Image (cartoon, helix red, strand yellow):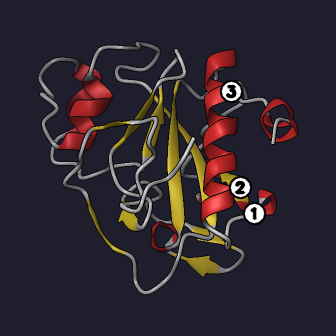
Amino acid sequence: MKINSQHQLSAAQQVPSPFYNQRPGCEPSLLVIHCISLPEGQYNNGHIDALFSGCLDCSLDASFADLAGLEVSAHLLITREGELKQYVPFNLRAWHAGVSSFEGREACNDYSIGIELEGTDSSEFTTEQYLSLQQVTKALLAHYPQLSKQRIVAHSEIAPGRKTDPGSGFDWDVYLNGL
């Protein structure tokens, strides 16, 4: 698995998001693991792509009401089948972390890469997702020297009290031991 000169993962389907901007003069130095499903617990329906592309029809489900007008993205999504979708090149700032802090440094979007796993805060993730996440992580660690195994965090760690993902179903040992 390779990252090309446009900071795109060669193995990923490219689904461009309008929700990004330039990083403020810094390289990626933090990897943030998230999870998402729309509606919660429902998979493979195109709603995540629509959300990150700015074209989610919020009338499709009552749970989408809070998403109206939301401008959010991630760098990458790993589906339940382990397939990869990239929304924002890794050298650009995706809008995934929100109000956040790591080791006293605010605004984690400025210096982080956000990876979403299709799932919920309480569901288990698939073997295919762990394998893809491990391969992606290895590629990112090789390409971006400021990233390290010690700088991989849950969204809940950088936004405590506000976020809980990737949740109790994410097996950190399985993930990290595969690196």
Residue drawn at (17%, 41%) of the image? 68
Is the C-beta separation of discs 1 and 3 under 8 Å?
no
Of tags 2 and 3, which is closer to the observer?
3
Relative to 145, 37 lies left or right: left
Residue situated in front as seen by the camera: 117 or 146: 146
Q: Where's residue 62, x and y in %? A: 23, 20
Residue drawn at (61%, 24%) of the image? 129
Of the residues shown, which amino acid type is indicated by label 1?
Ser
**Disc 3 secondary structure class:** helix
Measured in 3D between alpha carbons, the distance from the residue under mark 1 to the one under mark 3, in whole angstroms, is 18 Å
Is the C-beta separation of discs 2 and 1 under 8 Å?
yes
| Labels 1 and 3: the sequence-earlier one | 3
Residue situated in front as seen by the camera: 59 or 51: 51
Residue drawn at (55%, 77%) of the image? 106
Mark 3 = which residue? 131
The label shown at residue 116 is none
Mark 1 = which residue? 148
Q: Where's residue 166, x and y in %? A: 62, 37
Mark 2 = which residue? 152
Up-down relation of residue 114 to residue 131 (above or below): below
Measured in 3D between alpha carbons, the distance from the residue under mark 2 to the one under mark 3, in whole angstroms, is 16 Å
| Labels 2 and 3: the sequence-earlier one | 3
**Split into 4 quadrants, where in the image is the C terminus?**
top right
Up-down relation of residue 100 to residue 4 (above or below): below
